[in-house]
Image: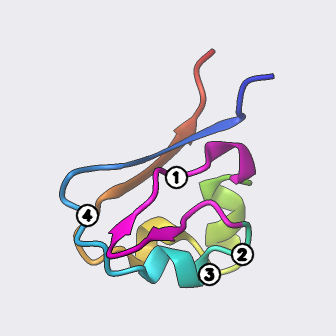
Amino acid sequence: MAEKYLVTRSIACISCGRCVFVCEYGVHQKAGACMASPDSGKCVGAEYCKSKDSYCGDVCPVDAILVDDSTE
């Protein structure tokens, strides 16, 4: 089954971890000093998180996170 949302993190990421703290669903995880690849399968979507003021893209200081509808 394909993920409903596709979460990507660009190379602009500075591994600050703010997305880890705001995401309630475990999409983002630290891997030592770096960030692990986002787990798109756990994402509930940008619109839902924005409605709860917990959107990972809003807390990223370098706009490195994109959440989009998944394309199969």
Choose mark 3 or mark 1, whichever is in front. 1
Q: Are marks 3 and 1 in contact (CB under 8 Å)?
A: no
Q: How is the image coloured?
A: rainbow
Considering depth in this image, is 61 or 21 the residue closer to the camera? 21
The image shows residue 11, relative to residue 31, as above or below, that is above
Q: Mark 4 packing: few (<14 Cα in 10 Å), some, or many (20+)?
A: some
Mark 2 element type: loop
Q: Which residue is mark 2?
A: 24
Considering depth in this image, is 7 or 50 the residue closer to the camera? 7
Please name the amino acid that badge 4 sits on: Cys
Choose mark 2 or mark 3, whichever is in front. 2
Q: Which residue is mark 4?
A: 13
Q: CA distance from mark 2 to mark 4?
A: 20 Å
| Residue positioned most to the right | 1
Which residue is located at x 48 percent, y 74 percent?
Answer: 19
Considering depth in this image, is 15 or 68 the residue closer to the camera? 15
Mark 3 element type: loop
Mark 1 element type: loop
Residue 2 location, x and y as percent?
73, 24
Q: Which residue is mark 1?
A: 38
Residue 20 location, x and y as percent?
54, 76
Q: Are marks 2 and 3 in contact (CB under 8 Å)?
A: no
Considering depth in this image, is 68 or 12 the residue closer to the camera? 12
Q: Which residue is mark 3?
A: 53
Q: Mark 2 packing: few (<14 Cα in 10 Å), some, or many (20+)?
A: some
Q: Mark 3 packing: few (<14 Cα in 10 Å), some, or many (20+)?
A: few
Give the mark, 2 or 3, whose residue is nearer the N terminus: 2
Please name the amino acid that badge 3 sits on: Asp
Please name the amino acid that badge 1 sits on: Pro
